[in-house]
Image: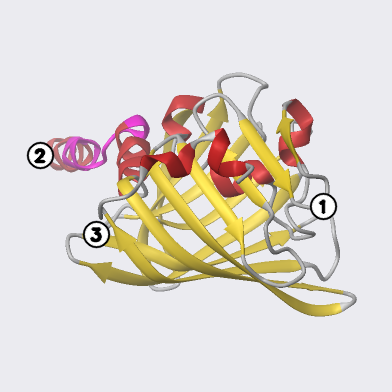
Amino acid sequence: MFASVFFLSWGTLIAQTPDGESILKRVDAAQTFSTMKAVGTMTITDSLGARKTTFINYTKGKDDTFMEFTSAAEKGQKILRNAKELYLFFPDAEEVTRLQGAALRQSMAGSDISYEDMTGTRNRSDNYTTGVEGSEIIDGRDCWKLLLTAKTRNVAYSKQELWVDKVNYLPVKGLYYALSGKVLKELSFGDVEKMGAFAMSTRIQIIDKLKAGSKTELRFSSIEIDKPMDLKIFTLENLSW
């Protein structure tokens, strides 16, 4: 009888735990909107102190991102990403640069965030296989713990550990690994705001594990989701305008 109860309970537990692939697809979906516009502030803290950069970020679907810096020191710098390419525009050089390969992992505006970190987080399910490692409480939120393994070497991180809120499927914490197994970055996500049918983390902290005392915090405000948007924003012509 006890054996029957044990196997029944274990079978029920397995049935209640979704597979990793389905969880990761829901994570991508929770961070993907037909359109999104947000004003952002990036605070970079290192041995030299703290400095702030402001920007406007536009997204369309899971592939298209356009970002324009608005603070005085970086004003006019722009980033455009589509499904296959990432481009930069620096007003001083007056030319468009296409980033490829390892260049995608360069620091953006001196922060702990790479260009790929900032623009390529809505398509994890395309780039990683996923398994469920269990459940944990992180910052008071009940989370699935996922282990993501890169399908190819063309992505920035060979492995990710990702803690995902079971209610809204937003990331709560992430550890990003190099091929050697060393942790490269630690991310935490907070200040979740409800916007109609949507929820969004409006604060993200990134710690570069290879740089002592260095961290970057992103805060988003004035968020508009699924509002009409001029799709010319996501073109090369807009990048150099």
Residue type pointed to by label 1? Asp
Question: At 67% across and 58% down in the image, what residue appears?
Answer: 76
Q: Nearer the viewer, mark 3 or mark 1?
A: 1
Left/right of residue 90 with respect to residue 84 in the rendered view: right
> Looking at the magenta stretch, what is its main secondary structure?
helix
Residue 150, position as x, y percentages in the image: 58, 26
Residue type pointed to by label 2? Met
The disc label shown at residue 235, or none: none
Q: Residue furthest bottom?
A: 49
The disc label shown at residue 92, or none: 1
Q: Nearer the viewer, mark 3 or mark 2?
A: 3
Q: Residue furthest top?
A: 152
Q: Quadrant of residue 63?
A: top left
Residue 219, position as x, y percentages in the image: 52, 71
Left/right of residue 224 with respect to residue 131 in the rendered view: left
Residue 181 visible in the shown view: no
- The residue lying toward the viewer, choosing from 19 and 212, is 212
Q: Nearer the viewer, mark 2 or mark 1?
A: 1
The residue tagged 2 is 1
Indicate the secondary structure of the residue bearing disc 2.
loop
* Residue range corresponding to the magenta coloring: 11-21
User: In the rendered structure, which disc, 3 or 1, sits on the residue that comes first in sequence?
Assistant: 1
Q: Quadrant of residue 152?
A: top right
Instruction: Compute the Cα span from label 3 to label 1.
Output: 39 Å
Indicate the secondary structure of the residue bearing disc 1.
loop
The residue tagged 3 is 198
- The residue lying toward the viewer, choosing from 139 and 98, is 98
Residue type pointed to by label 3? Phe
